[in-house]
């Protein structure tokens, strides 16, 4: 908890629940998941409080949201991985959380990947912002990687503009 002037306080609990399932009868199939549980214990905080943070922006006092939840299928096409669901793209510079698919294949010293989906977020609506990307990398030596990544994303933001002839 954090306490401030005038009775302001910020009391909240954050927990992560992570799991992985690897069915023994299907060794190439994996299910991975992580859920975020956040409980705001001081719902009386003012919207103007200096202690208010982005985790206090929800309409409910208890949030249980998926951080990631996906199905991995290994070696679908030679040495490859197909991932379907909510996931974080860590190849290249994108590093975004999406709801969609990701495919990566390794051939000798080469890797290539593709992904497509919509941007997923904790703090807004999902399924509105399409994303697509891909890339290839070459490893001439064990600790050297040369990569080219392509990425396209469209983000729609609803912003309210207030115009005034004078300062409030």
Image (tube, rainbow, N blue to C red):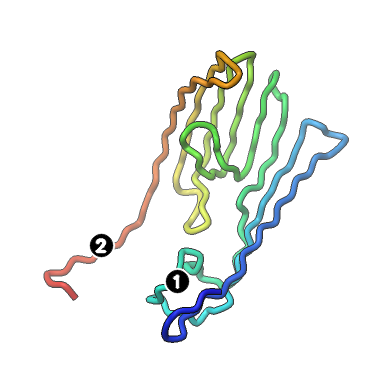
* x 71%, y 32%: residue: 73
Q: Residue furthest front?
A: 143
Hey, which residue is sitting farthest left in the picture?
A: 165
Residue highlighted by disc 2: 161
Say if 114 sits above or below 4 in the image.
Answer: above
Query: Image quadrant for the N terminus?
Result: bottom right
| 16 to 108, vertically: above or below | below
Where is residue 52 drawn, in percent x and y? 45, 71
User: Where residue 6 sits: x, y (%)?
Assistant: 42, 86
Name the side, left or right, on which 167 lies relative to 91. Answer: left
Residue 79 placement (x, y as % from top left): 69, 21
Above or below 58: residue 152: above
Q: Residue furthest right?
A: 25
Instruction: Answer few, some or many: residues within 10 Å of disc 1's Cα (few below 14, many 20 plus, some between 14 and 19).
Output: some
- Where is residue 132 shown, x and y percent of the image? 48, 34
Q: Residues within 10 Å of mark 2 (few under 14, many from 20)?
A: few
Labelled pair 1, 2 in contact (Cβ < 8 Å): no
- Asked if 70 appears above or below 51 in the picture, the reply is above
Q: Secondary structure at mark 2?
A: loop
Dot label at residue 52:
1
Q: Residue at x 56, y 17 (%)?
A: 139
20 vs 155, nearest the viewer: 20
Q: Nearer the viewer, mark 1 or mark 2?
A: 1
Determine which quarter of the picture holds residue 163.
Answer: bottom left
Task: Give the mark nearest the N terminus, 1 or 2.
Answer: 1
Q: What is the CA distance from the residue labelled 1 to the residue labelled 2? A: 23 Å
Please state which of residues 26 and 35 is positioned toward the viewer in this rendering.
Answer: 35
* Residue at image point 53% right, 45% down: 97
- Is 133 left or right of 110, judged from the image as shown? left
> Is 128 or 107 nearer to us in this picture?
107
């Amino acid at each position: 908890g954090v306490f401030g002037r005038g009775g302001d306080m910020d009391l909240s609990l954050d927990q992560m629940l992570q799991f992985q399932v690897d069915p023994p009868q299907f060794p190439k199939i994996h299910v991975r998941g992580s859920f975020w549980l956040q409980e705001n214990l001081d719902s009386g905080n003012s919207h103007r409080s200096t202690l208010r943070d982005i985790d206090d922006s929800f309409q409910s006092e208890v949030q249980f949201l998926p951080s990631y939840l996906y199905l991995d299928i290994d070696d679908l096409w030679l040495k490859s991985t197909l991932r379907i669901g909510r996931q974080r793209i860590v190849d290249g510079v994108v590093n975004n959380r999406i709801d969609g698919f990701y495919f990566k294949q390794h051939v000798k010293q080469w890797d290539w990947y593709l992904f497509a989906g919509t941007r997923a977020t904790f703090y807004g609506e999902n399924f509105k912002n399409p994303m697509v990307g891909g890339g290839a990398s070459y490893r001439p030596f064990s600790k050297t990687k040369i990569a080219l990544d392509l990425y396209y994303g469209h983000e729609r933001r609803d912003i309210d503009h207030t115009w005034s002839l004078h300062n409030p």
